Each structure stands twice: as structure tokens, then as C-alpha cells.
Amino acid sequence: MAAKSLQDKVIVVTGAGRGIGKEIALLCAAEGAKVVVNDPGVAADGSGSSASPAEEVVEEIKKRGGTAVANFETVAEAIPASKIVKMAVDSFGKLDGVVNNAGILRDAIFHRMSIDAFESVIKVHLMGSFYVSHAAARLFREQESGSFVHFTSTSGLVGNFGQANYAAAKLGIVGLSKSIALDMNRFNVRSNCVSPFAWSRLIGTIPTETEAEKARVAKIQQMGPEKIAPICAFLLSDAAKDVTGQIFAVRMNEIFLMSQSRPLRSIHRGEGWTPQTIAEHGMPALKSSFYKLDRSADVFNWDAI
């Protein structure tokens, strides 16, 4: 019998009542972890609340012989988010890993996006990842160990229509994760990002008006959320002790190591640049390396394996 990769570790998973978060919580528990299943039970747009999603996942974990507790706090405010971490310590005496998975969607084309739609998505995704991580960081610093797994998206890494709020949050999370990795590496604390391709209720909000959109969603529906869980469990385990500051994308049975921003080309002019010489010489020299206005589907344009 294979050893369990997360035996006796304590893991917090936010947004764990459904979809990807649920599958991560189930796998972490199966791998021997004690899990705090956080989910306030809101709708895809962040409205409402229900204790049922988190409670049902905890019940499922217990039926399978695992250990878990339910937590219903929001990640979108600092004090409630800190209570998620406190519950882990109060319930199980410590904390070894955090999965920042909680999220909402409020899509709109940019010129029609409301201030509230932008701010609410930023609050849950980016601020929520910060609040929970910040509360856990002090514990990780003291014990000189710990792992963060943050969820990003190709909507931020590559681009998508109608998701300025979501894309900004998800690319912000990449910067947050890298900063945590740099600042806390001396304390043996790791921080990585996962960009998932999987069917979930959030993806279920994608418009399906045209035949192309319907075909795209049909393909995504074949990619189950359970395919995302293994890399998260790995990144939380001691086997990942040398993996930090990275971005992974997961699509069905494919795992991609994503690029990070680095210089592509440079131009130099000894006497300096003017707007005119930039227009005449600078931009033409750089233009062949410009990025196109690609969307995620343009870059990942082959069927999932």
C-alpha cells in the first residue's frame, strides 16, 4: 500500500463546497490530511449563502474515513478570512497548507462593467487570497514550513473577453504568489499557482449563444474538476519541497509549466529616444515580437488529452 502524501498534515481549502475545491478537499483527505472545508455557499456571482455545500463535503470525507471540519466564513474580508486559519489551529493544532480556491464571476464587456462587479471579484479572488495567506503566513514563519497553492487563470495569463475584473484579479494573484515565494523562501515556505481547465459552475456562466460557443463549452464539460486535484495535493506535500514560485496549468491529463514575464527583445539608441525616433525605428524593430490579442482558446487550441 502506497504511503499517503499528506499524512497528518492540516490543510485549508477555500471554496471547497463544490467543483474544483471539493475535489481538492476530498483528495487531500484521502491522502491523509485533516481538512478545513471552507465555503460560505454563495451563488456563482457571490450572492446568498448556505451551509449545505461545506457540510456535505465534510460528511462525504467522514464517510470515507477522513477527518474534516466545515467553515462558512467569507474570504473577502480580513477578519472572517483570519478565522478560517484560526479554525484549523483550534480544531487540529496546526496548519501545513492553504489552497486559495474561492472565487466568483461577474462577467461583462469592459465599458459595461459596473464598479461593484469589478470590486467584488477583486475582493474575493485577489484580496481573499491575500487575507487567508497573510493570516497563515505568521504560523508558517514560526514553524518554518508551509505551502500555499493559489488559483490563477488563463483569463489573466493569456486573456479573455468580458473578464477584466477576473483577469486583473487572477494576474494579481500571480504577483502575490511570487512575492510570497521570494519573501518566505528563507523559512521553507512555498507558494505556487495553478491555472485550471475544468468544468465548474463558474465556467457554466459562459455565454452559449453561438454554435462555436456551444462547442467550446461542450469540450470544457469533458474536463472534470477531479483532474485538478492531484497537482494541488502534490504541491502541498513534502515531495514538492523544492517547487516554489511556479505557475502550472492543468487540462485533463496535461500539466503545463507556464512562462513568466521576461524581456523578449531590446532596442538601444546612443543619443536617447524621441517620440519621433521611437515611431520611425523603435517600434518597427520591436513589432515582430509583439503579442497578438489572443484569448485562452487561441493559445490552447487543441483538444484536451
Image: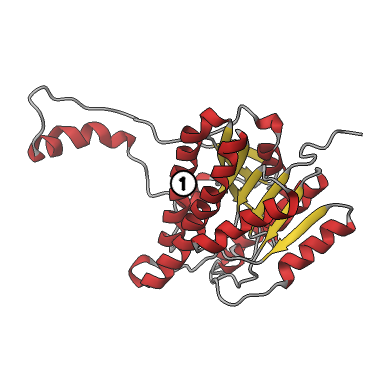
Report the residue that reaches farthest toward the right: 1
Towards the viewer: 246 or 74: 74
Instruction: Provide the residue designation for mark 1.
Output: 157
Left or right of 225: which side holds 212? left
Query: x, y (%) of residue 214?
Result: 60, 65
Number of on-image labels: 1
Residue 184 falls left or right of residue 265: right
- The residue located at (59%, 43%) in the rendering is 139
At which x and y percent is residue 33?
Answer: 77, 45
Amino acid type assigned to the residue bearing label 1 in the image: Leu
Q: Residue furthest bottom?
A: 48
Q: Say if residue 222 shows up in the picture.
A: no
Up/down of 218 relative to 183, above or below: below
Query: Which residue is painted at 55% across and 71% down in the image?
Result: 46
The residue positioned 44% from the left and 60% from the top of the image is: 122
Give coordinates of residue 246: x percent, y percent: 54, 35
Residue 117 pos. (x, y %): 43, 70
- Determine crowd level at label 1: few under 14, some 14-19, many 20+ residues with C-alpha closer than 10 A: many
Q: Is residue 184 visible?
A: yes
64 or 154, which lies in front?
A: 64
Nearer the observer, 133 or 89:
89
